[in-house]
Amino acid sequence: MSPAGARGRLDVNIKQKSFRAASGGKLHVLGELVFSLRSGELAALVGPSGCGKTTLLRIVAGLDRDFDGHVAIPAHGTLAMVFQEPRLLPWRTVEQNVRLAAPRASDAGLEMLFQTLGLEAHRDHYPGELSLGLARRVALARAFAVKPDLLLLDEPFVSLDDALAARLREELAELVNRRPVTTLLVTHNVEEAIGLADRLLLLSIGPARIVADVAVARPRAAHTPAELAALRHEIARRLNQPFSRENL
Amino acid sequence: MGMRLVSLALLIAAWYVGSQLAGARLLPDPQAVALAIVDEARSGALAFNLGATLARVAVAFVIAMALGSLIGLIMGRSRIADRLGDPWLIVLLNLPALVIIVLAYVWAGLTETAAIAAVALNKLPIATVTVREGARSLDHALDDMAQVFRMGAWTRLRHVVLPQLAPYLAAAARSGLSLVWKIVLIVELLGRPNGVGFEIGVAFQLFDVTRILAYALAFIAVMLAIETFLVQPLERHVARWRPRPA
């Protein structure tokens, strides 16, 4: 494999992860989870709420080291993450929030990011003055400003209205197309996963295991409604559980 | 503002009436005290003594705040440090100021170092307890964010931790300033050859109530000025990001 390819590669090999429950027993959250992402690949982890997706992301991000197994993130790689909540510093402006995370970002690069995400007018605003949709855009801008080798997205569009979520998804797709980055996207929204990912990793509920690894052919725009319906059906069958309408 | 002036005028009126009832020896009237302040100012003694006291207040305050905040931050973040430090803190908190001052003078002599150390030691545990409370309530979510984005130690302290501690630091500073200057006066009374506390001690021996009030009022004015022109603007600056009600 070429060095460039190795640089963005992610190898996850988790044997198991459990939490100590308040009652004293052990809560088995993650089962055996083995997968790899090629450099520049965007994989979506899809599974029902509470199946341990966020725990898995925290392990990959290095925030939780208390597990059995091994995770190899891109060597010397920079990491960026978009959390479920925007997690901005309320006492710093939008621009300062981005610059503090990405001190090496160029002015021109930031200019383009702010433009793509519609944030130019909000550079000097404090996060408390932003709507949730704008704050999520800032979190996206921050993640892309560091030019990460590995990007982790934890349900980045949850609790936004459909139209806004769709627009942000398009903006995310545009950013990823412009600069491909190895990306792990956690979501329980199958539509979102199909729309963005090259590959879907379907997770079962606790302890989480990968039940299926589904490739989504590119270009995404070329998918016909019939193909998409077939894909959805396939996913539902592999997850082996009834999907409610809202998940589709 | 208007109400404040009315309140202040009432205080001065009550003082005047009280001085007429009690007699000038026990409670001189406001005018006599004002004249005494002018006299002391003219001779240069007022500025000299105020300066000496303010310098002690400043040094002791800075030492106590810096050390107290640092220890508070460590105790709030580490359970072991908290368990180890807590008994010391309780002892210090409950040790009367006078005991610390007298012991400092006995052990280190009637020196400037002993005086300032005694004041700082009196203030330190209160700063520690306040900042520890703040450190305990630090937001783990922001910690995680800073770690993921590999922010450096200085960036984290300055942009992630300190802004969260700001209200606690402000509370510690505010209560600390009024405590420190009161204790500085006692320290000066007991073992320093100058400063507002020393002057009040001399006036006490001469039963000169006018001079006691003159120095007390002059010092209160200085502390009010510091509060208005230094502490409050600083607090406004630190809180500038909070959305204000329109």
Image (spheres, coloured by chain):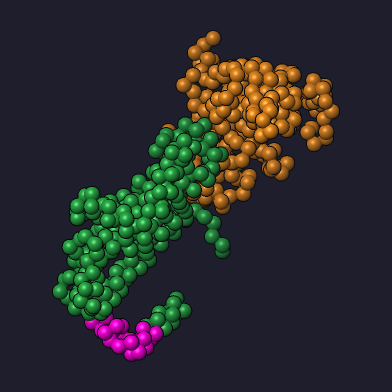
Chain colours: A orange, B green
Q: Is residue B12 left or right of residue B2?
A: left
Residue A8 picture location, percent across and down: 54, 19
Camera-nearest residue between A47 and B96: B96
B75, above or below B173, in the image: above
Q: Quadrant of the N terminus of chain A?
A: top right
The image quadrant that residue A202 belongs to is top right
Q: Quadrant of the C terminus of chain A?
A: top right
What span is in magenta?
A: B13-35
**Is residue A111 among what the camera can see?**
no
Q: Is residue B118 left or right of residue A200?
A: left
Residue B6 counted in the magenta span: no
B1, above or below B66, in the image: below
Chief secondary structure of the magenta span?
helix
Camera-nearest residue between B105 and A238: B105
Residue A82 picture location, percent across and down: 59, 35
Name the outermost residue toward the top.
A1
A176, above or below B86, in the image: above
Camera-nearest residue between A38 and B156: B156
The image quadrant that residue B151 belongs to is top left
> Going 43% across and 49% down the picture, which residue do you hit?
B90
> Going 24% across and 70% down the picture, which residue do you hit?
B200
